[in-house]
Amino acid sequence: MKYRILGSTKEKVSALGFGCMRLPTIDHKPSSGEIDEAETIRMLQYAIDNGVNYIDSAYTYHNGRSEEVIGRALQDGYRKKVLLTTKMPIWLVEKSNDFDRFLHEQLSRLKTDYLDVYLLHNLKKKTFHQLLNLGIFSWAEKAIDKGLFRYFGFSCHEPFSVFKVFIDSYDRWSIAQIQYNYMNEDVQAGTKGLKYAAKKDIAVVIMEPLLGGTLANPHPEILSLLNQANPQRSPVDWALQWLWNKPEVSTVLSGMSSFTQVQQNINSANHSDVNSLRSEELDTISRAQSRYSSMNPVPCTKCGYCMPCPNQVDIPRNFELFNTALVFNQVNLNKNIYQNIFPEEMHAASCIQCGICEEKCPQNIPIREWLRKVEELLGKKEIKD
Ligand SMILES: NC(=O)c1ccc[n+]([C@@H]2O[C@H](COP(=O)([O-])OP(=O)(O)OC[C@H]3O[C@@H](n4cnc5c(N)ncnc54)[C@H](OP(=O)(O)O)[C@@H]3O)[C@@H](O)[C@H]2O)c1
């Protein structure tokens, strides 16, 4: 495993971190609460045995089960081999007592006395002001003094201007977790955010390095472009190496859902390095970026934050069918799946326009508007305003 430095903490962190939001499930539904525990424990322990030392979870992942399964996976001496990170569900915080309540519940789920890193999950402008009023920073400093966690930070999907405000508001942040991949240079915090935080010695931890898996299965044209440049290198390896090439990146979290993916991504991390991509290779990625941008699909990463929908619409699945229909030019195939296989109650047409999902979407997607387009493209019925 290759190791990098975790910002001002000076901890040695593995180039590959284990993101625990997309673990294997028994019901084969991504991110469901039915985690395949035996397989997950095998994957986590294999990753740690092969040098991965950063584990990322959150209160809400897999309906709260992610932390519980990690807690069991880290028994038998594994706990002390990793930097264990989880996140406070700040949108559920109503009063200052909730800070301690969530932290202690999470410590108990994770079967540990302390966290290495505690993050404010999905920090937004509105919640940030509320947290400030509730005294979040003095609470965090006291919790660190008590040994409940070692480093404090936040994860964020906001644009650079807002990200910068968060970074500048506190001089004791250790970690900033951002969505970043070769398709998101100018999306959310983006390259500007990466460099800004790193310059302040705040460790930047990357989430969604494959745009939620999208970059693992690229459009045939992009695949052929990548293959022409290097037939040995997989699309996943291209995307990961592009990140590790950057000195400002501390660790790249991958949400691995199978044992093979863990093996492949560890192998990629093993031959990663800063400034190792040649200019022809960077040029190949630039051409892939331009081709992707021209396809213009819904910028959904299937993170599932929008779910559950009060009327059972499976929002990520609707967008996946819409995107693959357009990007892979398979409208008729996806119409067939949509109309004959995909349960009707989960269709875009069942949207009651309540907008609850839009408040939760980290990508700020106008979900209701896009669902109308999904139904127009794939559904039998026409939706009228
Ligand atoms: N704080 C936040 O707001 C937030 C938001 C999002 C994520 N995160 C954290 O960041 C982590 C990483 O984000 P992410 O899960 O979206 O990562 P990602 O790497 O962009 O996407 C993960 C998906 O990529 C596919 N994949 C991974 N390795 C592969 C391989 N070798 N070959 C083929 N496909 C591969 C898998 O898709 P399939 O399962 O379809 O095979 C996997 O589920 C999360 O797990 C979570 O810990 C945090």
Image (cartoon, rainbow, N blue to C red):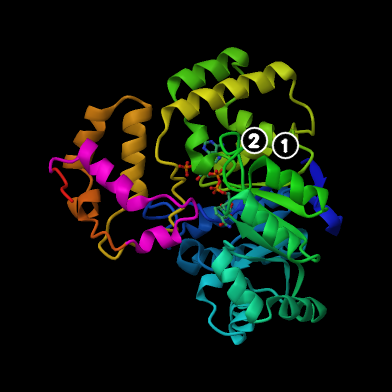
**SS class of the residue under badge 2?**
helix
Relative to 296, is 97 on the left or the right?
right
Question: Residue 376 shows which numbered tag?
Answer: none
* Residue lying at 61% horizontally and 23% vertically, measured from the top left: 286
Q: Can residue 88 be seen in this view?
A: no
**Label 2 vs label 1: CA separation?**
6 Å
Residue annotated with mark 2: 240
Disc 2 CB within 8 Å of nearest ligand 1 atom: no
Q: Residue furthest top?
A: 228
Give coordinates of residue 193: x percent, y percent: 69, 47
Q: How crowded is mark 1: few (under 14 residues within 10 Å), some or many (20 or more)?
A: many
Where, by quadrant of the figure, is residue 246 drawn? Answer: top right
Question: Residue 244 shows which numbered tag?
Answer: 1
Residue 302 shown in magenta: no
* Residue lying at 54% horizontally and 16% vertically, measured from the top left: 225
Seen in the picture, residue 341 relative to 326 is either above or below; the reply is below
Seen in the picture, residue 109 relative to 322 is either above or below; the reply is below
**SS class of the residue under badge 1?**
helix
Disc 1 residue type (three-letter): Trp
Q: Is residue 131 visible?
A: yes
CB contact under 8 Å: marks 2 and 1: yes
Q: How crowded is mark 2: few (under 14 residues within 10 Å), some or many (20 or more)?
A: many
Where, by quadrant of the figure, is residue 58 drawn? Answer: bottom right
Where, by quadrant of the figure, is residue 334 drawn? Answer: top left
Q: Main secondary structure of the magenta part?
A: helix
Q: Name the quadrant of the N terminus.
A: top right
Give coordinates of residue 156: x percent, y percent: 60, 57
Q: What stretch is highlighted in magenta?
A: 355-381
* Residue lying at 78% horizontally and 33% vertically, measured from the top left: 273
Residue 374 shown in magenta: yes
Relative to 148, is 100 on the left or the right?
left
Q: Which residue lies furthest to the left in this view?
A: 381
